[in-house]
Amino acid sequence: MINLSPSDKALVPFVSVDNMMKLIHHVGLEPMLKGLADYIEADFKRWELFDKTPRVASHSSEGVIELMPTSDGEVYGFKYVNGHPKNTSEGLQTVTAFGLLADVYTGYPVLLSEMTMLTAMRTAATSGLVAKYLAPKGADTMAMIGNGAQSEFQSMSMKAICGLKTVRLYDTDKAATQKAARNLAGMGLNVVACSSAEESMEGAQIITTCTADKQYATILSDNMVGPGVHINAIGGDCPGKTELAPAILHRSDIFVEYPEQTRIEGEIQQLDAHHPVTELWQVMSGTAKGRTSDKQITLFDSVGFAIEDFSALRYVRDQIAGTGLFFELDLLADPDDPRDLFGMLGRAAG
């Protein structure tokens, strides 16, 4: 239970984009990625306590707007997030988000936060966490195919959590690759800009795909993927959008967050509804196997799930204590007499 003192009840801490960036610098980029991964792992290990449902989506020809709710019985959380691939051409973010935590006992919100920056961090932290379980032992090179807003976060998370040494960048837009290479310069990685997806995969034990087009696409064809790699497929995140040739899926052991959601939005929407997959929480809790051989192709079919956002918000709430990196919002009506809301309105006129 989240305890609220009387003085806390009328004000809700709000973490703005500016304060979120300050918090990341205060904690440190890599320590925060590792901290987020620790919180996500802890919550995945108590997976069965959570309410779970596929996100509530409102689709349009321009994109999607979604709500992602969950609760562990004591704390409730949700994220509002959009996905509009066409935004990039208009100078706008593809993804924006905000989220909230509330105390189940009172129903009172206890945290409101931006989640555009935080979603980038938690998505990358999840990828690094999963690779820790599934990537080949000693993996130190990653192909990063799709060099948009997520690519640098993914690269730094793999470095922080898995010991990545080299990232090989490729995007159909050379300017995106140049941007990613520029941002990653001096961050402790060997950064290689590549001229094709095939070139980016040379020597890579981890392959991350993160493209933005809202359509069925073949970013990886079957002949591009050899045995023993870990594929981190994070671009397919809505119905009708995929990145991998179906033949790759049939050769891979597939790991997912929440099958009921991934079968709608992930790479496995291309497969029969009964195609076997393994849930990540089972691997983390030791009830299912992850990587079992050097020749195995492991595939993380990542679409993002509400528990990861819950974990990220929980981490932020713990970290902001004593930092002043938040505003107090007058978000809740708090009359002296809880039954006299109208009287509170009347007194405000004076």
Image: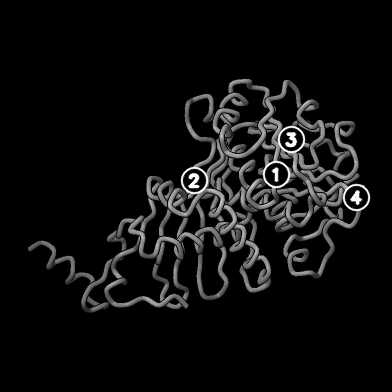
Point 64% across, 64% down: residue? 52
Residue at (62% x, 67% y) in the render: 43
Rendered position, 17 above or below 201: below
Q: Is residue 298 visible?
A: yes
- Which type of secondary structure does the marked residue at label 1 adopt? loop
In the rendered structure, which disc, 4 or 1, sits on the residue that comes first in sequence? 1
Q: Position of residue 131 (x, y in %)?
A: 73, 51
Q: CA distance from mark 2 to mark 1?
A: 22 Å
- Label 2: which secondary element: helix
Q: Residue 219 location in percent, x, y?
A: 76, 31
User: Are the residues tagged 1 and 3 within 8 Å (C-beta)?
Assistant: no
Quadrant of the image containing the C terminus: bottom left
Q: How many marks?
A: 4
Mark number for residue 117? 2
Give the Cα separation between the discs numbered 4 and 3.
19 Å
Q: As drawn, is 15 to the left or to the right of 85?
A: left
In this rendered view, identify the residue nearer to me: 130 or 237: 130
| Type of the residue with mark 3 | Ala
Residue extending farthest left: 350
**Which of the numbered marks, if any, corresponds to residue 294?**
4
* Left or right of residue 337, residue 160 in this image: right
Q: CA distance from mark 1 to mark 3?
A: 11 Å
- Asked if marks 4 and 2 touch (Cβ < 8 Å), the reply is no
Q: Earlier along the polypeptide chain: callout 2 or callout 1? A: 2
User: What is the quadrant of residue 197 in the picture?
Assistant: top right
Is label 4 in contact with label 1 (beta carbons under 8 Å)?
A: no
Between marks 4 and 2, how big is the CA–CA gap? 35 Å
In this view, the mark in front (1 or 3): 1
